[in-house]
Amino acid sequence: MQLGLINSAWAQAGRETSFGIQKTREIGFDAIDIFADPLDIDVRERKLIKDACDKLGLPIVGVPCVAVGLIDFNPSVQRFHLERCRKYLDMAYEFEARNLLLVLGEYIWQKEVIPPGEQWEAAVANVRALGEYAEDLDLEIALELEPFALSLIRDVGSMARFLDEVDHPAVKANLDISHLVLSKEPPEAIRTLSGRVAHVHISDCDGVVHGDLPPGRGVVDFPSYLAAIRELNIQDATISVELEYSPEPDRIVEWVREAYESTSLLMREAGLRA
């Protein structure tokens, strides 16, 4: 499997996109995920990103997209976010990426006022429509499991149910190892998603609070989760390191390098990386 990095690690430390792409390659990553909103960058910047990655031999694998408006109770907001997600898919196509990493968000008002089933049904219908659009572009949608109490997809069971109801081959799961830990999902639980995993995220945490730390700085038992991922036989997928909000932004290069070295070693020991 390839080892990638989500470039938001650099952006949240105040470093420009070109710097992040260059350092991602220098450190040794095989691939990169580009966290950018197509409504915030124009076609020229998108071309600069693609050209920079091509020049360095750094393929763009995924494009993360947070689209909580897909489950908003206002139809106009849903329509806007459907169109916004289609623009994300267009950008992923321009980047020659493999997938759109999609975050759906949470139930509002503690599941009160509006029946939670209505938000679920809206998400299913909208993601199915996006799956059809993605399939036309030869792309996949990888849904992220978010380990928060009111997340629409918060554990393996809800992920499997959601994929069943969307019922589209272009819509699959993203496995985020620290999110699985925070959701109290054991490694063997991911077997439920066999054949339906498009992408993997890796980071560490303290077992209680969302952290996105370099592997080795928290409590995650990576060998057992990586062994379970190996059993899924998804060799064409990428494991992308996700690092958010470094406590020392001025030392972001060291932070990312630490994550690369620890993750690369873990993957080699698990038989997932040469």
Image (spheres, grey):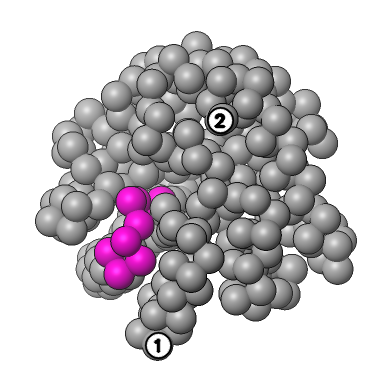
Q: Is residue 18 visible?
A: yes
Q: Position of residue 120 (x, y in %)?
A: 30, 42
Q: Residue at x 48, y 70 (%)?
A: 55
Q: Position of residue 87 (x, y in %)?
A: 29, 71
Q: Say which amino acid is labelled 2.
A: Arg
Q: Residue furthest top?
A: 188
- Judge the density around disc 1: few (<14), some (14-19), many (≥20) Cα neighbours within 10 Å: few
Q: The C terminus is located in which quarter?
A: top right
Q: Compare residues 143 and 20 and report the one nearer the observer.
A: 20
User: Is there a contact, CB below 8 Å, between mark 2 and mark 1?
Assistant: no
- SS for dot 2: loop
The residue labelled by disc 2 is 273
Q: Compare residues 102 and 71 and report the one nearer the observer.
A: 102
Q: Compare residues 92 and 244 and report the one nearer the observer.
A: 92
Relative horizontal placement of residue 15, taking residue 239 as reference (left or right): right
Q: Is residue 124 visible?
A: no
Q: Position of residue 232 (x, y in %)?
A: 40, 19
Q: Residue at x 60, y 38 (%)?
A: 202
- SS for dot 1: helix
Relative horizontal placement of residue 257, taking residue 11 as reference (left or right): right
- Judge the density around disc 2: few (<14), some (14-19), many (≥20) Cα neighbours within 10 Å: some
Q: Earlier in the sequence, mark 2 or mark 1?
A: 1
Can residue 152 be found in the magenta stretch?
Answer: no
Relative horizontal placement of residue 259, taking residue 186 as reference (left or right): right
For the record, the magenta segment spans 93-101
Please identify, in this view, whether the residue under mark 2 or under mark 1 is nearer the observer. Answer: 2
From what the image shows, is residue 245 above or below residue 204? Answer: below
The residue labelled by disc 1 is 44
